[in-house]
Image (tube, helix red, strand yellow):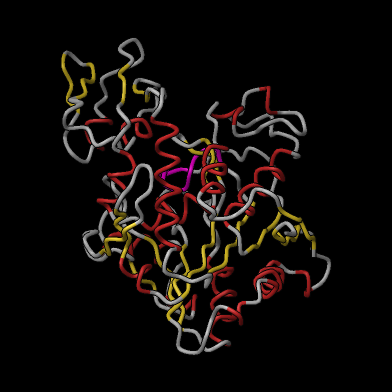
């Protein structure tokens, strides 16, 4: 069986036909969307609207380009994402929509509605039976599950818990409702480094379940209440809280993949994926900032295979020269060095291998530059 094609366009442009919008359109059309989008299909376009304070998320105009192609085929597209587990401006549909609108994801810009996939407070979901190693039933956001077709527009980044976040994480973690996100994170428990903790209370403020308190100006975690969301780690700027990575790292990646399998289970191959290799930050778009990119902008990938597109993404990023003024360790500066391991030192390939074992796709691919 021939390797799955992954189509690639760089960002060079010396004429209008080579603009980013035209390249997005051409790449998406190479996926032959006419074979998986039919007239009147409800088409979920999964995207991250960006946490307020960040600026590295995919630009709305590129999503609009995909919307226009879908509508020309007779489909009925909508942009979507699910509410967050952690406290913040995307925890409920009202705040989430306002965050999306403030970042330019307006129906007037997109030519399509924006729908928060798991409803007002994250309780609109479908229980999907998958009987996998870690998850028996996945809680998938209803708007995604009930859509006829599915398109994931992903912005690959580093990630504090998985090392790398791309299409698989955008699908799996991104489409679980709030309870599903909690189930995926449940094996993580934070550790307090008392030497570094300054007692500013940021972790207390951002903990969604009140599992942290200050005792003598040092954070103390109630691990019986902790849901393992990792928000305390992201909110601490001093290294005062970390996560013990013994086996949970592997479990989280596996659970994300199992949720991705649940998302795609009823779609009957009616899906496609695009990764935007721009502003490749050490942190995911869930944090309220965008750090110096790890490497320069590279281009856009498109594929019908979520495993192949993520593997191709990592391979392309690793061939780049590391940004010496980024947070990356020196071990990642040279070409062909593992950039994500030089940031987080996490074996992110676990998710690719596990997804391949579940037959979600193949790590083997054929890169086709347009």
- Number of callouts: 0
19 sits left or right of 78 in the view:
right
Q: Quadrant of residue 157?
A: top right
Q: Nearer the viewer, residue 305 or 105?
A: 305
- In this view, the residue farthest toward the right is 14
Question: In the rendering, at what x and y percent does residue 48 appear?
Answer: 45, 57
Residue 232 vs 106, above or below: the answer is above
Q: Quadrant of residue 316?
A: top right
2 sits left or right of 209 in the view:
right
Question: In the rendering, at what x and y percent does residue 161 appear?
Answer: 44, 35
Q: Is residue 24 magenta?
A: no
Span colored in magenta: 281-289
Residue drawn 22% across and 31% down? 204
Question: In the rendering, at what x and y percent does residue 264 appear?
Answer: 45, 63
Q: Nearer the viewer, residue 89 or 345?
A: 345
2 sits left or right of 240 in the view:
right
Q: Nearer the viewer, residue 154 or 35?
A: 35
User: What secondary structure characterizes most of the magenta part?
Assistant: loop
Quadrant position of the C terminus in the picture: bottom right
Q: Is residue 287 magenta?
A: yes
Residue drawn 33% across and 47% down? 135
- In this view, the residue farthest toward the top is 195
Q: Nearer the viewer, residue 273 or 281?
A: 273
Q: Quadrant of residue 107?
A: bottom left
Quadrant position of the N terminus in the picture: bottom right
Residue 208 vs 117, above or below: the answer is above
Question: In the rendering, at what x and y percent does residue 2 appear?
Answer: 75, 59
Residue drawn 30% across and 53% down? 89
């Amino acid at each position: 069986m021939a390797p799955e094609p992954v189509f690639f366009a760089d960002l060079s442009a010396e004429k209008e036909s080579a603009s980013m919008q035209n390249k997005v359109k051409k790449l998406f059309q190479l996926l032959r969307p006419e074979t998986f989008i039919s007239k009147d299909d409800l088409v979920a376009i999964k995207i991250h609207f960006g946490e307020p304070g960040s600026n590295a998320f995919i630009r709305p105009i590129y999503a609009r380009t995909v919307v226009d192609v879908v509508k020309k085929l007779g489909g009925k597209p909508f942009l979507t994402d699910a509410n967050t587990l952690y406290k913040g401006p995307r925890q409920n549909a009202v705040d989430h929509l306002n965050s999306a609108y403030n970042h330019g994801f307006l129906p007037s810009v997109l030519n399509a509605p924006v729908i928060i996939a798991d409803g007002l407070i994250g309780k609109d979901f479908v229980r999907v039976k998958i009987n996998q190693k870690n998850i028996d039933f996945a809680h998938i956001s209803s708007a995604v599950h009930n859509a006829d077709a599915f398109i994931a527009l992903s912005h690959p980044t580093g990630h504090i818990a998985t090392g790398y976040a791309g299409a698989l994480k955008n699908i799996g973690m991104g489409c679980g409702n709030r309870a599903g996100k909690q189930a995926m994170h449940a094996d993580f428990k934070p550790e307090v480094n008392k030497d570094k903790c300054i007692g500013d209370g940021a972790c207390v403020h951002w903990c969604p379940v009140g599992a942290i308190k200050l005792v003598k100006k040092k954070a103390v975690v109630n691990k019986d209440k902790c849901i393992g969301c990792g928000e305390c780690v992201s909110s601490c700027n001093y290294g005062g809280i970390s996560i013990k990575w013994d086996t949970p790292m592997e479990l989280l990646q596996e659970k994300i993949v199992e949720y991705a399998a649940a998302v795609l289970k009823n779609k009957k191959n009616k899906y496609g994926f695009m990764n935007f290799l721009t502003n490749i930050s050490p942190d995911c778009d869930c944090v309220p900032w965008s750090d110096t990119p790890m490497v320069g902008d590279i281009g856009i990938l498109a594929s019908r295979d979520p495993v192949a597109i993520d593997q191709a993404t990592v391979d392309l990023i690793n061939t780049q020269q590391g940004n010496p003024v980024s947070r990356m360790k020196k071990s990642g500066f040279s070409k062909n060095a593992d950039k994500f391991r030089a940031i987080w030192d996490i074996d992110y390939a676990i998710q690719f291998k596990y997804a391949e074992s579940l037959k979600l796709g193949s790590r083997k691919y054929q890169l086709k530059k347009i």
